[in-house]
Each structure stands twice: as C-alpha cells, then as structure tokens.
Amino acid sequence: MTPSDDRENTRYLRKAYTAKSRQEVSGCYDAWAGDYETHMKNVGYLHPAMVAALLTRHVTAGTGPILDAGAGTGIMAEILIALGYPEVVGFDGSKRMLDAAASKNAYVELRHMYLGDTLDYPDDRFAAVVSAGVFTQGHAPLSGLEELVRVTRAGGHIIFSVGPAYLDGPFQKKREELEGKGLWRFVDASERYNSTPLEEPLPARVFVFTVT
C-alpha cells in the first residue's frame, strides 16, 4: 500500500481527530460508515484486537452483559462473540455506524448515545465494559470514564484504549482522581503500541481497572 493509499483510507479519521464538537465527529463517522472497516483494516488498526486481548486475560468467557462503549460498526462485538462472550450491548454517537453494527445482528441491544453524557443505563448493569479507539483526540472526553464506572458492577472490569492526546498527562490525572475517590483499582495495562500505522505513529495503551 502506498502513502497516498494510507492518506485516502484515513482521511475521515484525520478529520475526526481535529473535530471541534461531538456533532462534527459524529458527522464524520456518518459519512465514513460505509467504508470504515475496509479502510481501517487496510492500515492495520489494532485497538479492537488489543482491547479484546486484555479482556480475555481478566474476564471469564461467558461473562455478561458486556458494554461496548463506542461500538462503531460492530467490530468489537464480532470479536467478543467469537471469543465466547455472547451478550454484548453497545452504543455510539454516529447513527450510520450504528446501522452498520445492527446489520451484523451481533448486539443484544444498540443505542444512540454519546460518551461524556449521562448514559441511559442503570447503575451496576454490566459485568464488564470495553472501549476501543474512543478515548483519544477529537473523540470522547475522559469525564466519560465516570459513567462507565457507574454502570459497571463492583468487581467488574473496564478495559479501554487511551490515545496520544490523553496518554501522557491528562489520563494519569483522571486515573488518580478516580482512584482517590475509591471508584476503581488498577489491574493491568499493555505496553505502548502503534494503534493505526500511518506516516506519524499514533501511540496508545490499553488499561484494565476493576470497579470497587
């Protein structure tokens, strides 16, 4: 694949990274939904596989329900079902991405919501939460982590990737805030990896916390 192919495959991603509002980023993904999976697979997109790998390390197969926060086109649910986690619930801010996810019949429930708002789920609903490629520049604010904690059962796990905008500095501050409040406990983390190989590396890590 040539550098020009890479730029074409990820031009919507670049727009999303520089979005100034959630409406702008949702509109970007609405426009991209039809080609999203092809484009991202072509550039070696790693977040879903990395998050799923950490999930299998800490959450027993068959555990559910699992919330996919930022479901996109449903890549994560397909992976989780194949790995033995059949009960997956998802939400996303892009309606067209949700349409693509719904067409796979992989989720037991899908909703249109934004990470960073109050989520329309009761306290303690989920046994685990996953979020791949969402906590990064132009996407969800770190304040969305508090809602993920709220909807996860005590002893449940939250497994999520953190992108370059938050990785050095902002995430550490948020992590310590939630630890200080006694809301979660650190369990595990991946090493750094290049989440979407382009001309410029996009470093990321996956973190695992247990809700207390």
Image: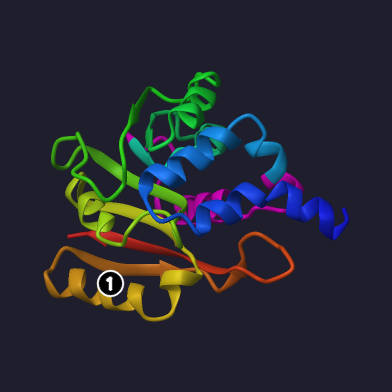
Instruction: Name the quadrant of the C terminus.
Output: bottom left
Q: Residue at x 52, y 39 (%)?
A: 29
Figure check: 10 above or below 190: above
Q: Report the residue marked by disc 1.
A: 175
Indicate the amino acid at tag 1: Arg
- Residue 126 drawn at (x, y percent): 26, 40
Q: Residue at x 32, y 34 (%)?
A: 65
Q: Residue at x 35, y 39 (%)?
A: 67
Residue 184 occupies quadrant? bottom left
Q: Nearer the viewer, residue 138 or 100?
A: 138
Q: Was residue 54 drawn as part of the magenta stretch in this picture?
A: yes
Q: Residue at x 42, y 57 (%)?
A: 160
Residue sticking out furthest to the bottom: 169
Q: Was residue 13 drawn as part of the magenta stretch in this picture?
A: no
Give left or right: position of 9 versus 94.
right
- Residue 33 drawn at (x, y percent): 58, 33
- Residue 31 drawn at (x, y percent): 57, 34
- Residue 61 drawn at (x, y percent): 44, 40
- Look at the image and give the residue range highlighted in magenta: 40-65
Give left or right: position of 67 versus 95.
left
| Render colour scheme | rainbow
Figure check: 186 above or below 89: below
Numbered disc 1: secondary structure: helix
Q: Nearer the viewer, residue 141 or 205?
A: 141
